[in-house]
Image (tube, rainbow, N blue to C red):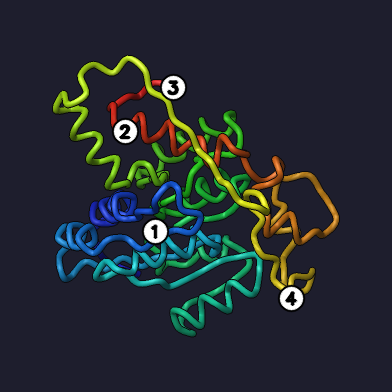
Amino acid sequence: MSTTPSTTRRSFVAGLASSALALGAQRIPVPTPEHRIRRVRRRYSANDQIQLAVIGAGGMGNADVDTALLIPGVTLVAACDCYDGRLTEIREKHGPQVFTTRDYREVLARSDVDAVIVGTPDHWHQRISIDALEAGKGVYCEKPMVHRIEEGRALLEAEQSSGKTFQVGSQGMSSLGNEKAKELYESGAIGELNYAEGFWARHDPIGAWQYDIPEDASEATVDWDQFLGNAPRREFDPLRIFRWRNYRDYGTGVSGDLFVHLFSSLHFIASSNGP
């Protein structure tokens, strides 16, 4: 287990948010610009060591890991996913020494994990984040923070009682374009803000969230019960796990996946805490 002071771990988890840049209009996360990485690197000493795990190793989970590993002293020690194919990819990409499992509780039980990235479907965010905080881990959770509004209070209480950092990742909060817009707004370049309008368009011939289904997707390669979690019981359906954003049982629809980028960006630019 790392002996790095907890303040360094908290700084790292918070810093991950500022370094994990993905352009809002892009369907696939893009690499973080080198100049932004250099800025984050300067915050840590050569002796800082952060041992990281990812729970949910799909698109955003993988992208977040790639960005985190650009920071000196950060290593990936464990990964969890319900689909065996993603765990195989993790070992091929990061080495056979990375511990892999279908059960996230095995990751949280490890003493060598300092912080976790939660990149699971939305319906798992609250439970895994609370369990991670109670296990003494820092948490970087992809947006949205929770699947249902009523789940929020318990998670906030878990953060406060744990003394650990809980960071929600949202692209608009780590966008270089939004940083510039905030600078211009605060300088008075556009005067008083009275009205703001935004839009989000995905002109895709097959529609949004129609991700590829692995050819080997089956009950043998997927832990279906683990995926379902607290969602309603259903027969195995590969569409539901690999295109989960299309289903309210697991995702939060357009508002939780796309609209959030608009209002979080506006809040950031205008330093607003309101709805």
Q: Amino acid at mark 1?
A: Ala
Which of the labelled discs sits on residue 156, or is there none? none
Q: Quadrant of residue 226?
A: bottom right
Count neighbours of disc 3 (C-alpha within 10 A) and say few if under 14, some if 14 to 19, many if 20 or more.
few
User: Is residue 51 or residue 91 the one in the foreground?
Assistant: 91
Q: CA distance from mark 3 to mark 1?
A: 30 Å
User: Is residue 132 or residue 198 the one in the foreground?
Assistant: 198
Which of the labelled discs sits on residue 275, or is there none? 3
Residue 193 point in image, percent of width and height: 28, 18
First in sequence, mark 4 or 2: give its number: 4
Residue on which disc 1 sits: 115
Q: CA distance from mark 4 to mark 3?
A: 43 Å
Judge left or right: residue 141 versus residue 149.
left
Residue on which disc 2 sits: 268
Q: Amino acid at mark 2?
A: Phe
Residue on which disc 4 sits: 216
Residue in the image at 68% along x and 55% along y: 243
Q: Give the secondary structure at mark 4.
A: loop
User: Is residue 10 or residue 122 the one in the foreground?
Assistant: 122
Residue 114 point in image, percent of width and height: 37, 61
Q: Give the secondary structure at mark 2.
A: helix
Count neighbours of disc 2 (C-alpha within 10 A) and say few if under 14, some if 14 to 19, many if 20 or more.
some
Q: Looking at the rendering, in which quadrant would you find the N terminus?
A: bottom left
First in sequence, mark 4 or 3: give its number: 4
Q: CA distance from mark 3 to mark 2?
A: 12 Å
Q: Amino acid at mark 4?
A: Asp
Residue 162 point in image, percent of width and height: 40, 44
Q: CA distance from mark 1 to mark 4?
A: 31 Å
Residue in the image at 55% along x and 63% along y: 58
